[in-house]
Image (cartoon, rainbow, N blue to C red):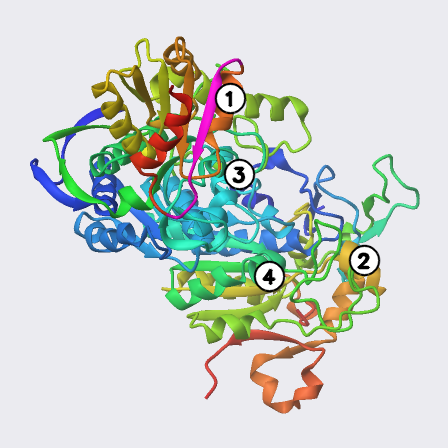
Amino acid sequence: MSEHLYKYLRTETFPTPFCAGCGHGILMGVILRAIDELKLDFKKMVFVSGIGCGAWIPSPHFKTDTLHTLHGRPVAYATGVKKANPELKVVVISGDGDLAAIGGNHLIHAARRNVGLTVICANNSIYGMTGGQLSPTTPKNTKTMTTVMGNPEEAFDLCKLVKACGAKYVARYTVFHTKPLIKAIKTALNTDGFSFIDVVSPCPTQYGRRNQLPTLYDMYAFIKNRLVHFDALKKYKKEELAEKIIIGEYRDED
Amino acid sequence: MIGMAEIRLNRKWCKGCGFCVEICPKDVYTRDTKVSPRGFQEIIIKNPERCIECFLCEYLCPDLAITIIRTQHPINKETLPNDL
Amino acid sequence: MKTIVKSLLAPRKYFMQGNIACAEGALAAGCRYYAGYPITPSSEIMEHMSIRLPEVGGVFMQMEDEIASICSMIGASWAGAKVMTATSGPGFSLMLEGIGYAVMTETPCVIVDVQRAGPATGQATKPAQGDVMQARWGAHGDHRIIALSPWSVQEMYDLTIKAFNFSEKYRVPTILLADEVVAHLKESFVVKPEIEIYNRDKTLTETPFGTQEEDGVPPMPCFGQGAQLLVTGSTHNEYGIRKVADPDVQERLVTRLCKKIDNHKKDICLTERYFTDNAEYLFVAYGISARSSYAVVSELRESQINAGLLRYITIWPFDEETLKECALEAKVIFVPEMNQGQLVLEIMRILPHQKVIPIPKTRGEAIYPSDIIKVFRKYHE
């Protein structure tokens, strides 16, 4: 990341605690670029995160107010922060297990309530910090620590879920889509109401290693071949989409 | 050295994942052949003069360790990769 | 910072339900954020807050569950508001992790637990005092909290204010451990023209999570003030930086979290004594059980029996000194409780050589003076 963005960081906490090749670092940079481009007052921003690797993106790295909460509860904490002081820009950055499994209830209700939050899900489809167990966004048949024969369950499409709950702005990109992702985060931060971005972030250590994708580049190549844009969905049959990653802004279906 | 982008690699932050080596369209980076005391093959800026300032490595470095300082002259836009 | 403010309600006598008095006490203390989830027998607090908070410029949130309630309340507290939630047994169980988080991050907040008969769903509309030990030890890990036990509608009002003051002063979650009887009781109580409240110290500091003293309470700046706060439930140093593998940091933090309460017991521990000097028969009680005990003690005194009552207003931290003082000449110590014996364990521990008799009642109804007298007769020749 460019050195001109170091002003947003507690540089003394670096290097990051993430594994080599973890996508979360890329996401960290992208979020800061979006904030820098919008020229937001960083002092008036609060970053709320839960427990897990994704939660470490803002805490302790961001040089502003951060709230590192209980596992699964960042959206509930953020709701309290935002409601008690609406002048603060409140951003939740947390993982898929945190937001969608243990914290799923808070996520859907915050979307329903249309609380003025931006929620960024650092989605690596795995429980990284605890050793690579299945998460609710792990694709079917994927091998994890707790599904050594392959995941028998279907995965959540978090964007579809949150959109259905009434979120004002919903999008998904991978960390490799830096430019569109920056644009999406900027749109989300400017959205009046609840905004949600699902960011596919590769985890070579826990996810890749068990699925013959041990480096970030392997995961990059794997993800690249599975992308389908939301606007092109109609070209595909339902069964063709089973293993695809849908990217783009989720709009209301006509 | 006028006309060459400055590539700054923050070695304290780099963990040697090597994504810059693989993602760079111009082969600017390479890995050291031997493993450093930190436990990985350090990244070497082998061909800095080849840099076309596409910024892929800067944006995609997972350790926020790369900064590219632009040259002052305009660069050849056609050489930029457009798949991302 | 201690200040005197005018009471919100016009100063006079009121006839009110305990739950409503509690809500009014919270508003008077400066509560401006309430998050809760409906549960009998505490719901009236929430209903009243939903009407009154917007009137005073506060925020009311009905959350999706009790976990969300306590979490959003902690968030709001860091955003600078005085915060409260109210619940009962099942909801209180769900809140425990959040209470532990509030202890660790030293977040001022008030939790009202209107106790009902458990375990589990139990008897939703019936009183009990079964959450005494849960309030003390419920959150995991070594910690201290403050718990107050009201015995009247007056105290539902007064102690709610006190709970806010303790919570703000010591940066610790404070629990108002009420029960269904005082919560649904309607009686008259007095609102004084002025009340003393305590507002947290919001001084900008680099070290909002540590002090030089081993029992100090650091200032607590809030979000948006420019303090660059690092709030975390993980073990952290005085700056808030996570130190999850440092034994010294863990020891220093946990010691201070405990000592900041233990070393200020004189200020926190509130008790009331009735005829305890030279009492041969000492009744130790709290909440509604104390009210029944008071009736018993008054009756015994009229029959020239040397009985006394020590009433615990602050249950946690537990005031050991006062108990020892009052029990000096006691032949028998009775502990009536609406549970199978919880606070009595603490008393037995402190007075190992004295005769301590529990008077438990878990029938989902108030402990009556007759229940207490019945046991007393067995020990009074």
Q: Which of marks 4 and 2 is nearer the N terminus?
A: 4
Under tag 1, what secondary structure?
Answer: helix
Residue on which disc 3 sits: C139
Residue on which disc 1 sits: C348
Residue on which disc 2 sits: A215
Q: Which of marks 1 and 3 is nearer the N terminus?
A: 3
Horizontal side of residue B56 vs A106, given as left or right: right
The nearer-to-camera label among 3 and 2 is: 3
Residue at the location (41% across, 26% down)?
A: C378
- Amino acid under label 4? Ala
- Tell me whether circle 3 and circle 4 mark residues in contact (CB < 8 Å): no
Q: Which of B28 and C142 is in front in this view?
A: C142
- Say which chain tag 4 marks: A
Q: How crowded is mark 1: few (under 14 residues within 10 Å), some or many (20 or more)?
A: some
Residue furthest to the front:
C381
- Amino acid under label 2? Thr
Q: Residue C94 location, x and y as percent?
A: 49, 50
- Say which chain tag 1 marks: C
- Say which chain tag 3 marks: C
Which residues are drawn in magenta?
A: C353-364
Determine which quarter of the picture holds residue C114.
top left
Determine which quarter of the picture holds residue C64.
bottom left
Cα separation between marks 2 and 1: 62 Å
Residue at the location (45% across, 32% down)?
A: C106
Under tag 2, what secondary structure?
Answer: loop
The nearer-to-camera label among 4 and 1 is: 1
Residue B4 falls within the magenta-colored stretch: no
Residue C356 falls within the magenta-colored stretch: yes
Residue A37 visible in this rendered orientation of the protein: yes
